[in-house]
């Protein structure tokens, strides 16, 4: 890729892919790393194709814009042909942008989902630790509050998700 916007979008996607891959060890048996890697690599390859198409469309749009104000009659077949191609190029430009944004949103959503899941597990662990510590230091057998209950529910959801994922 030779255009700055498309190259930048692809590098951002690569950074997001790295974030996704960092979550895989913590997700354990919930994902198959081989299948996940194929899917992620496929998404990046598809994005690269869309961005390559978009940079070619960028050049074409510039070429068509350069002849838009040409000093030729409005009813000239050349002008009409250029106008038709300009409209087609604009439509293709929008579609390629929509495709790229769809892929970028999906990759970002995958990264955020994995990171959020890991963070939820960390928060649940902190809540469990707090419950045990408070029970120990206050002498109470059971600490009232939403934190421990939330931790238990979160852990139960995680365990159920893992069980479903294994099937």
Image: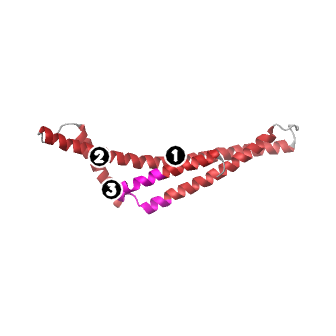
- Give the residues in magenta: 18-38
The residue under label 2 is 154
Outermost left residue? 139
Q: Is residue 31 magenta?
A: yes
Sequence-first disc among 3 and 2: 2
Q: Which quadrant of the view contains residue 91?
A: top right
- The residue closer to the viewer here, 155 or 137, is 137
Sequence-first disc among 1 and 2: 1
Q: Position of residue 154 (x, y in %)?
A: 29, 46
The residue under label 3 is 162
Labelled pair 1, 2 in contact (Cβ < 8 Å)? no
**Disc 1 crowd, CA 10 A, few/some/many (<14, 14-19, 20+):** few
**Alpha-carbon distance for marks 1 and 2?**
26 Å
Instruction: Give the residue displayed 67% in from the left and 49% down from the top.
Output: 55
The residue under label 1 is 105
Question: SS at mark 3?
Answer: helix
Q: Which quadrant of the view contains residue 116?
A: top left
**Alpha-carbon distance for marks 3 and 1?**
25 Å
**Alpha-carbon distance for marks 3 and 2?**
12 Å
Q: Magenta stretch mostly in which secondary structure? A: helix
Instruction: Give the residue displayed 21% in from the left and 36% down from the top.
Output: 145
Sequence-first disc among 3 and 1: 1
Q: Position of residue 30 (x, y in %)?
A: 37, 57
Q: Which quadrant of the view contains residue 76?
A: top right
**Disc 3 crowd, CA 10 A, few/some/many (<14, 14-19, 20+):** some
Residue 36 appears left or right of 85: left
């Amino acid at each position: 890729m030779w255009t700055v916007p498309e190259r930048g979008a692809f590098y951002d996607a690569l950074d997001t892919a790295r974030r996704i891959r960092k979550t895989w060890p913590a997700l354990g048996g919930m994902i198959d790393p081989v299948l996940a890697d194929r899917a992620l690599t496929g998404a990046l390859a598809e994005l690269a194709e869309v961005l390559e198409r978009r940079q070619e469309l960028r050049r074409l749009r510039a070429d068509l814009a350069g002849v838009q104000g040409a000093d030729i009659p409005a009813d000239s077949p050349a002008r009409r042909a250029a106008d038709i191609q300009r409209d087609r190029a604009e439509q293709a430009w929008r579609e390629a942008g929509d495709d790229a944004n769809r892929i970028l949103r999906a990759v970002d959503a995958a990264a955020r989902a994995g990171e959020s899941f890991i963070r939820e597990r960390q928060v649940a662990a902190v809540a469990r630790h707090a419950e045990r510590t408070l029970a120990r230091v206050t002498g109470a057998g059971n600490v009232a509050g939403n934190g421990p209950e939330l931790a238990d529910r979160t852990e139960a959801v995680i365990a159920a998700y893992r069980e479903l994922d294994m099937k």
